[in-house]
Amino acid sequence: MDIINPATEALITTLEGDTAASAQKKYEQVRQGQPAWSQTPITERIATIARFSELLKNQADELAATLTQEMGKPLNQAHNELNGARGRIQYFVENSEKWLAEEVVTEEEGLVEKIAYEPLGVIANISAWNYPYLVGVNVFVPALIAGNAVLYKPSEYTTLTGLKIGELLHQAGVPENVFQVVVGGGKVGQALLELPLDGYFFTGSNRTGHYIYETVAPKMVPCQMELGGKDPLYVPNDNANVAKTAQAAAEGAFYNNGQSCCAVERVYVHQAIYDEFMEAFTQEVQQFKLGDPEEEGVFIGPLARQEQIAVLEQQVQDALDNGARLLTGGKKADRTGYYFEPTVLTNVNHQMQVMREESFGPIIGIQRVADDEEAVALMQDTDYGLTAAVYCDTQEKAKEILAKIDSGTAYWNCCDRVSATLPWSGRKKSGFGSTLSYQGIRTFTKPKAYHLRVMNNN
């Protein structure tokens, strides 16, 4: 495996990836270790994860630098990701014992009915490259706390980060026969699907998620999918802060180079404020600094994957061929590395790829609408259902609109954010199941119902 720096296209290092045989060996190792881990008091498991969080804090500079070098995320955003991951870990540390405790639901003379939450067993965490710490801790942290063993497959685009995660977990006290990192591309991913695991948790594209779901279905084990999005943002005419809204929308669309499942991917603006919004939005995007992700002040780094450049070029050309107008950007940046200029398209419609297909890059289409009814119809015109945002003056209006949108998350006057206290889930092609919140703690367990009756001698 060649690890390439997307900013320079230079070789960072070469690693030996796993094979089906080595994946099988790691599976056998964690299968053997899981029962003892599940019997370890939950307070000890939680303390281990707390130590892992401290290690992330103590080694943040090194970890952020590695993430930036292999994925292209601007260095300050890499630090933001580490801080965000530690915040989520803190939620799990403080709340897991409560939500994994046995629940007594009925207690009457001679009868107790209660629910126990048992670990699934050995699970696969097939993770993503765009936020390897954030999407990783959503899965492997609550899974470990609940008493599971984990085969963790980082994306091949963030292999060094994935290996470091494994190293720090072991250093924190998670036994090696409880957490193992499996590295490689599609072939080793296929090997995981063929192992007799007790659950599969995937973050990535809809296409790959669909394949995983179909492949493991005969096993009848939990299979959870966090997939893509085509997340809409709407600005009605009752908005007294158009310029501020445009700035927030631009950041929501272009943060992490647009490589976020919950990034704003299409914008609808009421015709009464459209021109004002477009001017402010375009000015904001044009001041984003593109460059070396290790350089201070850079907001737009390289794409993580070279092949995504062709996808973005195709979306721009398709839009222009069908009548869109290019306001800024629109092409690969003239420099070494996988850079694409931040791109704003107007005069767009839903016949264009940029408004229907996931972009996962620094590109946005902005469409004029006549009223709320048209906006809702367009927001709903998608195969995805991850997030939706409305920026307006009153919460009542936003809730009225968002209630009509089939998405797992709804935003009023914010976007592109995730909270550890709320479930993170998708609908339609955006996936299913929940991570985060108390639901994301119990995701990694199977409930057992106890009916406990006292026999008397009469």
Image (spheres, helix red, strand yellow):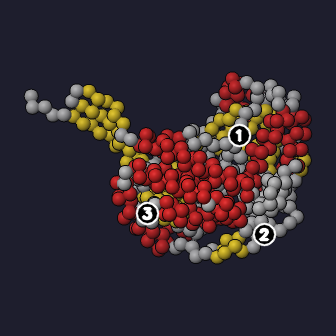
What's the CA distance linking mark 2 and mark 3? 37 Å
Residue 368, x across and y down, in percent: 84, 36
* Amino acid identity at mark 3: Pro
Within-10-Å neighbours for mark 2: few <14, some 14–19, many 20+: some
Specify the quadrant of the image occupied by residue 457: top left
Within-10-Å neighbours for mark 1: few <14, some 14–19, many 20+: many
Give the label on residue 8, or none.
2
Q: Is residue 445 left or right of residue 15?
A: left
What's the CA distance linking mark 3 and mark 1? 38 Å
Quadrant containing the N terminus in the rendered view: bottom right
Q: In this figure, which residue is indicated by the disc labeled 1?
A: 415
Within-10-Å neighbours for mark 3: few <14, some 14–19, many 20+: some
Q: Secondary structure at mark 3?
A: loop
Specify the quadrant of the image occupied by residue 350: top right
Q: Is residue 315 visible?
A: no
Q: In this figure, which residue is indicated by the disc labeled 3?
A: 175
Q: Is residue 401 left or right of residue 188?
A: right
Q: Nearer the viewer, residue 57 or 273?
A: 57
Q: Residue at x 88, y 39 (%)?
A: 280
Give the label on residue 190, or none.
none
Q: Quick check: 400 above or below 255?
A: above
